[in-house]
Image (cartoon, rainbow, N blue to C red):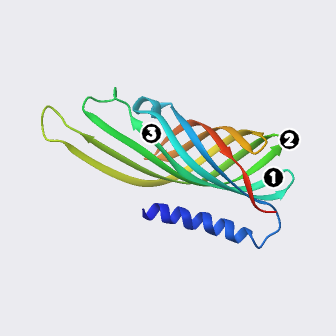
Amino acid sequence: MKKLLIIGAFLTAFINSSYGQEGTIRVNPAVMLGVPIGDFSEVYGMGVGIGVKGLYSLNTGGELTFSTGYTRFGLKDSYAAGLKGSLGIIPLLAGYRHHLERIYLEPQLGLSINSSTIKGSFLGMDSFGGSASSTSLGYAATVGYFLGDIDLSLRYQGLALSGDGLGFIGIRVGYQFKLKN
């Protein structure tokens, strides 16, 4: 709950600080499907998530962005018998979106709040479980396309967790609307 309050505070501060500036302010809520790649795909299955992005127009070709959300990846059944678990990722990413007509490119950098849980039983013993949280470097690179106000994008999102890089391909569908002209 505390993490969600922090995320809300960041987003509110971003939007409110932009009101004193000239430019268009947009909000882009979305749903996302995440496909783990590399070592990440050996342990976790597909992830689903929601997100919101705040955008501040600098000019006709570019916008500053701030993104957050939550994506959950479940532990694969084939990973270990008797284990259930998940990894939740909350990104706090700032970036720059450059428009090329309807197509855009958007690199982002920031923090990733990661929370993992595990539950299981082993050889008939009592069940056990645990959870852990950490904060790491988060980054993303996105290519997107607009169909009116509908935002379709494909992104690589990564995080540096315990010295290892974990990443996934995200398929995102959002809807963009203006808060301020």
What residue is rendered at 34% in x and 29% in y?
79
What residue is rendered at 81% in x and 45% in y?
99
Q: Mark 1 is on which residue type?
A: Gly
Say which of 24 and 45 sits in front.
24
What residue is rendered at 64% in x and 40% in y?
173
Say which of 31 and 117 sits in front.
31
Say which of 168 and 152 sits in front.
152
Placement of 6 over or under 59, stated as above or below: below
CA separation in Å, label 3 and label 2: 34 Å
Residue sitting at the far top? 78
Residue sitting at the far left? 125
Residue under pointer 2: 101
Say which of 30 and 66 sits in front.
30
Point out which mark residue 25 bears.
none
Report helix, strand or loop for mark 3.
strand
Q: Mark 2 is on which residue type?
A: Glu
Report helix, strand or loop for mark 1.
strand
* Residue 38 coordinates in the image, percent (x, y): 50, 30
Placement of 121 over or under 10, stated as above or below: above
| Relative side of 148 to 114, left or right | right
Residue under pointer 3: 73
Residue under pointer 1: 62
Q: Mark 3 is on which residue type?
A: Phe
Placement of 167 over or under 27, stated as above or below: above
* Residue 54 coordinates in the image, percent (x, y): 68, 57
Q: Quadrant of the C terminus?
A: bottom right
Report helix, strand or loop for mark 2.
loop
